[in-house]
Amino acid sequence: MTLFFFISSKTALDIVCTKTSLKNLMMDRSLPFLCFFLISAMFAAPSDALSPMDKSKIRGMFVFGSSVVDNGNNNFIPNSLARVDYPPYGIDFPLGPTGRSANGENIADILGKMLDLPNYIPPFNDPSTAGSRIVHGVNYGSAGSGILDETGAVAGNVISLNQQIRNFETTTLPELEMQLGQNSSRILPQYMFLVASGGNDYSLNYLLNLTRSNVTLEAFTANLTSTFTLQLKRLYSLGARKFVLVSINPNGCAPVAMASAAGEGCVERINNAVQMFNIQMRNLTDALRPQLPGSGLVFVNAYKIVRDIIRYPSFKGFRNVDTSCCNVSAIGFLCVRGGPVCSNRREYVYFDGNHVTEAVNRVIATKAFSSNLGAEVYPYNVQKLSQI
């Protein structure tokens, strides 16, 4: 009696069909049929399907949020003031100025490479983002947008987080099911959902007091947290299981904020406001876990990571922590179109008046992926989440 251990269909084919002697093949009439079965099995599986050995592999990533992750969606929005599809943005990006608010790659780009995704995640608003282009994910991020629908009104037309989720639900999800020939409940656990939003809800909403409602910071943050919680639950109901939540950066240390502080350093009023929400976001990773069975939530403390760089820049090779690499306009924080830019961009924390450089994005993404420090990623890192 012969016992075969089938490590894979290719290995079994080699053992049974190649290494079996002709004499044995003639004596055992079942072997030709077994060879035929193995050959058929090798070529029957869809090329994009994950084999049992690849269950921990992330098939793709869906990205939601603001300018931290926007990779060009606002380029396709009429009357949007939050557009950076011009030089010197993208000066270090292979495709040039695509709408990313940095000199090069953003956090989502870098994490995608670390997860071995084959291409940059395409922006939802690009008409070419359809068909086979969506099978590894879609980016819905919109610069100037926020968790709250009213956030970003001063930036013209932007896409709120609620609308980003609706775009995923109504357009992408049905097409993804059609492309992969599977129900979303089977597909989406193999995807990562990256959410980086909330900063504009303070800088372009609460701190500007646009609603004139005189709501307290505590009440505003509580409303923001409850809205964000509902949004995560909505994504879960659609099939999302692996969540990466990126905190708000220390926006009080950005050059545009420090310029208003008359040389007194970071504006702690701004930092204290965003930190109130960051703490709530971290708490959600524990609070939501029993409410979302089978899910994994990772909190990336970008606030601490960037603040540590600003406090101890030389540890990571930075030199300039308080001025922008590009020339910014006198009435805003974006780079002047076609304006001059620093040559030593690797040494700058900020590219424009509010957004960090690719070098800082790389530090955040690297720590998100592999840090074992609970103060930087909680309760574990993205690499471990991808294996759950």
Image (cartoon, helix red, strand yellow):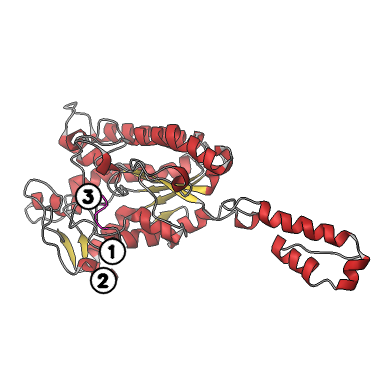
Label 3, secondary structure: give it: loop
Amino acid carrying mark 1 in the image: Ala
Asked if one can make out residue 229 in the rendered structure from this viewpoint, the answer is no
Q: Are marks 2 and 1 in contact (CB under 8 Å)?
A: yes
Question: Badge 3: how crowded within 10 Å, few (<14), some, or many (20+)?
Answer: some
Q: Position of residue 324 (x, y in %)?
A: 15, 58
Q: Give the CA distance from mark 2 to mark 3.
A: 28 Å
Asked if one can make out residue 99 in the rendered structure from this viewpoint, the answer is yes
User: Dot 2 corresponds to which residue?
Assistant: 317
Q: Which mark is residue 85?
A: 3
Residue at 75% x, 64% y is 13
**Disc with the residue nearer the chain's start (2 vs 1):** 2
Label 1, secondary structure: give it: helix
**Disc with the residue nearer the chain's start (1 vs 3):** 3
Does residue 340 appear left or right of residue 371 in this picture?
left
Compare residues 71 and 94 and report the one nearer the observer: 94
**Disc with the residue nearer the chain's start (2 vs 3):** 3
User: Dot 1 corresponds to which residue?
Assistant: 359
Q: Position of residue 299 (x, y in %)?
A: 41, 50
Q: Is residue 109 magenta?
A: no
Q: Nearer the viewer, mark 2 or mark 3?
A: 3
